[in-house]
Amino acid sequence: MQAVTLASPAPDPRRRSFDASGKLTVALLFLPPAVLLFTIFVMLPIGEAAWYSGYNWNGFGPPRNWVGLDNYRFVFDNRAFGIAFRNNILIIVVSLVVQLPLAMALAIILAETFRGAVALRMLFFLPYILAEIATGLIFSFVYDGDYGLLAAICRLFGVEAPHLLASPQTSMLAILIVVVWKYFGFHMMLFIAALQGLDKNLIEAARIDGATRWQMLRFVILPLLKPAIKLSVFFAIIGSLQLFDLIMPLTRGGPADSSQTIVSFLYNFGVTRMRIGFGSAVGVILFVGCVVFAFSYKRWVLRDE
Amino acid sequence: MSDLSHASSRFDPVTFYKALFLLAVALFVATPLVATVLGGFKSLGELRTNPFGLPLNWEMEHYASILFSWRYWELLRNSLIIATLATTLTLIVASMAAFVFAHVAFFGSKMLLSYITLGLLFPAATAILPLFIKVRDLGLLDSYMGVVLPQVAFGLAFSILLFRRFFKDIPHELLEAALVDGCSYANFYRYVTLPLSRPILATVGTIAFVQSWNSYLIPLVMLNSESLYPWPLGIMIYQGEFSAEWHLILAFITLTILPTILIFLIAQKHIVAGLTAGAVKG
C-alpha cells in the first residue's frame, strides 16, 4: 500500500490551490449577469405589477393612494375588457381550428421531397419572420376600401368594396385572416421538423401492410405527431394571448373597441393614460392567465413527455 | 414516398388536388407581398386601376425619395444599433449562464434554471408598466439601453435553453481531459466550447437579432425622442403623415422589410433550426 502511495506521481489534492479548476470561479462569474438581468427586468416588474395594482397611481412620486382590489373590479367591469377577452378566445379558437389543420396539411405535403418543396416551405415561413407592424401595414393596404387589393377584387365582380377594418362587425374577421396568414408557416415548420424526425420504418411497414393514404394518416402519422401537435397548440395559445403589434397598425383596437385584445386594452387604457395601477392589474390578470394555462397544460397534456 | 415524382407517368387526382391546394396557399401568401413591392413603383392613380399587375410605367421616385432621405437611414441606424447591442449581450450573457448550467453541478442549480425558465411563460406586455417605472428609475428612459436591456432579459430563458442543450452534447470526456491537463473551466469555455458552438451561436444570434429588429411595444414605451426611434415606430409615424398616399407607404414598407428578408435568406437554416428545436425532441 505504502509503495503505491510513494510511487504515485499525482499531486496531493490538498496541495493544489483551492478551486484550481476554476469551477467555483466560473459559477460565480458566469451566472450573475443572466440572473441579475432576468431578476431586475423580468421578475421584479412582475412582482411590482402585483403591488402597483393595489394603488391608484399616475407614476409620479411614490404610490400612496391604496385602493385595494378596486382596479381589478374596474377592469372586469370595463366593457372593452370583456370584448378583449372574448377576442382573445376567438383568436385561440381560430388558431386551433383553422390554422393548425392548414399547417398540418401543408406540412404533410411539403415534408416530401419534390421540386419546389423547399421554396414553398420558405415562402410559407416568410410571413412569420416579418415584423408584425409591417404585416399590419401591408394588410391595412390590402383591406383599404379605395386602393386595396380586396376592393379591386370586389370591383372585378361588380360588388361594392367592404371597409372591413372600419366596421365593428368585420374588424375581427379581418384581423383573424392576418393572424392565420402570418403564423401558419411557423406551425407548418414545427410539423415538418417533427415529420422528418419520424421513424421511416413504421411508415414503410404500414405501406407494405397495404394501408390506404387515409389510414396511414389517421393511424400512423397523426399519432406519431402527437408531441409536435401538443407543442404547436401550446405556442398557438401563448402567442394568441399576447397579440398586440398586429392590432396597432390595423385598427388600434377599434372601431368602438371591437378588435381590442387584452394587451391592446392594457396599452390603450393603462399605458397611454398613465394609469399605472389599472394597467398593472390588467398585466397581473394576463400573467395569471398565462402561468395557470402553462402549468396546467404541462401537468395535464404534456405529462407523458 | 414521393407521390409527385411519378405523377408524370399517370394522372393522379390526389396529386392534382395537392398541387391546386399548394397553388392557392402560395397565392394567398405571396399576393400581398408582391403587390406591396410593386405598389411602390406605381402612381397613386395606377395603384387604384391596376393593383395586381406590373406597373405600366415604373416610377422610381418614390423609392428614391425615401432612399435619399435622412429619416429612413436614421431609423435603420437606430434599429441596427439596438438589435446589434441586444444580440451581442444575449450571446455573451446567455452562453455564459448556459455553460454553467450544462457543466457545473452545484446546490440549487436546477432550481435556478427553472427560475429563469419561468421567463418562457409570459410576454413582456404583462409587466410593461412596472418595467417602464424601473427603466425610468434607473435613468435609462429614452436611451438605447433602456430598450436593449429589457429585450435581452425577456429573451434570456429561450436563449439559455438552446445553448444549454447544445453544450450538453459536447462530449464530457473532452472537459475531463482538459481539466486533467490543467485547463480551467473558464478557459475551456473560451477555447473549446465557444469555437465548437458556431452553429448555435448563429441560431441564437439570428433569432435575437430578428426579434429585436421587429420589436415594437418595448421601444414604444421606453423612447420619447424621434431621433432614437427604431423603424417600427418610425413607419407608424410615416403612415400617419401620408395616410392616403399608399404608393409612398408601400415603398417605405418594402425598404424596411428588405433587411429582414435578406437576413432570412442568408440565415433561414439557423432560424428554422432554432425555432423548431422543441418539435423534434421535447
Image: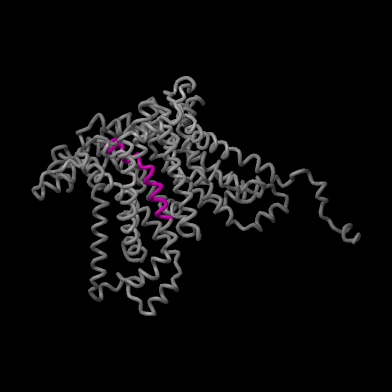
Relative to residue B190, is residue B148 drawn left or right? Answer: left
Q: Position of residue B98 (x, y in %)?
A: 57, 47
The residue most toward the left is: A158
Q: Nearer the viewer, residue B208 or A302?
A: A302
Choose top left, top right, bottom left or bottom right for residue A250.
top left
Magenta-drawn stretch contains A246: yes
Choose top left, top right, bottom left or bottom right for residue B176.
bottom right
Q: Nearer the viewer, residue A273 or B34?
A: A273
Q: How is the image coloured?
A: one colour
Give the magenta range. A231-252
Asked if residue B39 can be seen in this view, the reply is no
Quarter that holds the N terminus of chain B: bottom left
Counting the numbered discs, the total is: 0
Q: Nearer the viewer, residue B28 or A64?
A: A64
Instruction: Identify whether A136 is placed above or below A196.
Output: above
Asked if residue A40 can be seen in this view, the reply is yes
Q: Position of residue B133 (x, y in %)?
A: 47, 27
Relative to residue A52, is residue A217 drawn left or right? Answer: left
Relative to residue A148, is residue B111 drawn left or right? Answer: right
The residue most toward the top is: A61
Magenta-drawn stretch contains A239: yes
Q: Position of residue B92 (x, y in %)?
A: 55, 41
The residue most toward the right is: A2
Instruction: Identify whether B152 is placed above or below A274.
Output: below
Instruction: Give the main secondary structure of the magenta stretch.
Output: helix
Q: Residue at x 44, y 31 (%)?
A: A69
Instruction: Identify whether B281 is placed above or below A179.
Output: below
Q: Position of residue B22 (x, y in %)?
A: 27, 60
